């Protein structure tokens, strides 16, 4: 693939754009903003394009894919589609079959697309997520400066329901858990909490001053702490697979399993439907969860052989992923 013929769509207010601007590396960027008609901005670039590679589904992209007949399409998911299968189904509504080229990272994704969405093998391409190549450059953090990351995915209900939810209550109890905090202080291990960006946008309040030990960070720091932290506590956030790729333990806290709120997420939160997906590391109560955290710390955050094999089973490939994707793009464009 000739790099000079590749264009990259980027928000002109993003931190990445500012970084590239400082490095004078903006030659092939298409600048967009949420308040501008997206289609009008990129249409001139589509006239001679062969393929549109996308990692985030939204309606403007779907409209382009459906209406520009000569344009091939490749979707690279932002994370492994495993817990949130209903959302994945929504994302692909309306896409014509001949445009449904997708990158899949895992045998579990293959099963879902094949069985549930009726994809044909010709449109599914085995590779992985591009960021995993960066992960390969990262050695598991064995320094004395360790941290544990807590990050849960969002709930779609209103802020009024959110404030009454077991999710909010249990989260606050966990972040102020005396047993956990005392132990981490003695071990000199930081506790990091990153709120999901959807909760932040919905202005769901989080006051760090209400918590004794946890360090609150916004989601722009997420990549940094995925790489730095030695263990993740989550519910069904897709960042769990980033930790699995890095062979770092993931503890699933079924934080609102017993909540009687009837909300949409329970259709794809597999809390009580298939416990095996949590790799035997799931808890609905905090006391055994905390004991598991302490056990991992005592064993220097190492995985046992059985769990390591399960983590490995989540990925088709763990090396040369970007190279594989470029090869896939070339194959798709050569078929035009």
Image (spheres, grey):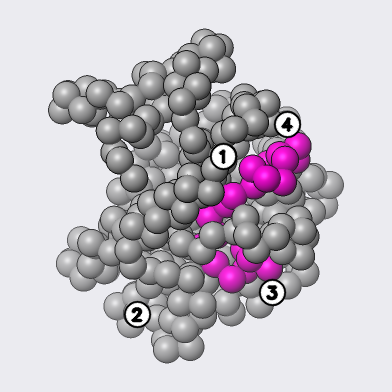
Work out whether mark 1 precedes mark 3 in sequence or the reverse, and give the earlier one. Answer: 1
The residue sitting at 68% across, 31% down in the picture is 66
Single out the residue that lies furthest toward the bottom.
305
Q: Dot 1, how many residues are within 10 Å of its Cα: few (below 14), some (14-19), or many (20+)?
A: many
Work out whether mark 3 precedes mark 2 in sequence or the reverse, and give the earlier one. Answer: 3
Residue 150 locus on image (x, y percent): 46, 54
Residue 101 lies within the magenta run? yes
The residue sitting at 64% across, 43% down in the picture is 99
Name the residue that disc number 4 marks.
158
Quadrant of the rendering where the N terminus is positioned: top left
Work out whether mark 2 precedes mark 4 in sequence or the reverse, and give the earlier one. Answer: 4
- Measured in 3D between alpha carbons, the distance from the residue under mark 2 to the one under mark 1, in whole angstroms, is 43 Å
Position of residue 118 in the picture relative to residue 329 (left or right): right
Residue 8 locus on image (x, y percent): 38, 31
Name the residue that disc number 3 marks.
275
What is the number of the mark on residue 302?
A: 2
Camera-nearest label, 4 or 1: 1
**Nearer to the camera, 167 or 60:** 60
What is the number of the mark on residue 85?
A: none
Q: Dot 4, how many residues are within 10 Å of its Cα: few (below 14), some (14-19), or many (20+)?
A: few
Callouts 3 and 2 close, C-beta under 8 Å: no
Work out whether mark 4 precedes mark 1 in sequence or the reverse, and give the earlier one. Answer: 1
Can see residue 69? yes
Name the residue that disc number 1 marks.
72
Residue 6 locus on image (x, y percent): 35, 34
Of helix, strand and loop, which one carries label 2? loop
Callouts 4 and 1 close, C-beta under 8 Å: no
Residue 190, above or below 51? below
């Amino acid at each position: 693939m000739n790099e000079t013929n590749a264009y990259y769509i980027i928000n002109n207010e993003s931190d990445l754009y500012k970084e590239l601007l400082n490095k004078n590396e903006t030659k092939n960027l298409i600048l967009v903003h949420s308040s501008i008609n997206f289609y009008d901005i990129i249409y001139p670039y589509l006239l001679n394009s062969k393929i549109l590679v996308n990692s985030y589904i939204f309606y403007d992209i779907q409209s382009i894919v459906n209406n520009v007949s000569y344009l091939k399409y490749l979707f690279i998911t932002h994370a492994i589609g495993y817990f949130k299968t209903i959302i994945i189904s929504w994302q692909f509504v309306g896409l014509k079959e001949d445009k449904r080229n997708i990158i899949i990272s895992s045998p579990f994704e293959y099963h879902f697309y094949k069985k549930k969405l009726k994809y044909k093998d010709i449109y599914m391409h085995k590779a992985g997520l591009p960021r995993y190549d960066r992960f390969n450059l990262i050695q598991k953090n064995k320094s004395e400066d360790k941290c544990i990351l807590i990050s849960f995915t969002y709930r779609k209900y209103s802020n009024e329901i959110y404030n009454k939810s077991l999710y909010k209550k249990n989260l606050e109890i966990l972040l102020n858990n005396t047993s956990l905090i005392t132990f981490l202080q003695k071990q000199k291990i930081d506790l990091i909490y990153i709120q999901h960006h959807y909760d932040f946008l919905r202005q769901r309040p989080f006051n760090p001053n209400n918590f004794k030990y946890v360090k609150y960070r916004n989601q722009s720091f997420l990549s940094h702490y995925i790489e730095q932290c030695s263990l993740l506590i989550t519910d069904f956030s897709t960042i769990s697979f980033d930790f699995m790729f890095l062979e770092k333990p993931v503890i699933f806290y079924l934080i609102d399993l017993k909540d009687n709120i009837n909300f949409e997420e329970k259709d794809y939160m597999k809390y009580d439907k298939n416990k095996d997906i949590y790799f035997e590391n799931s808890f609905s109560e905090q006391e055994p969860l905390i004991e598991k955290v302490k056990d991992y710390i005592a064993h220097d955050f190492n995985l046992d052989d059985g769990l390591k094999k399960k983590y490995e089973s989540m990925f088709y490939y763990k090396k040369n992923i970007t190279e594989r994707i470029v090869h896939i793009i070339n194959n798709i464009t050569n078929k035009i």
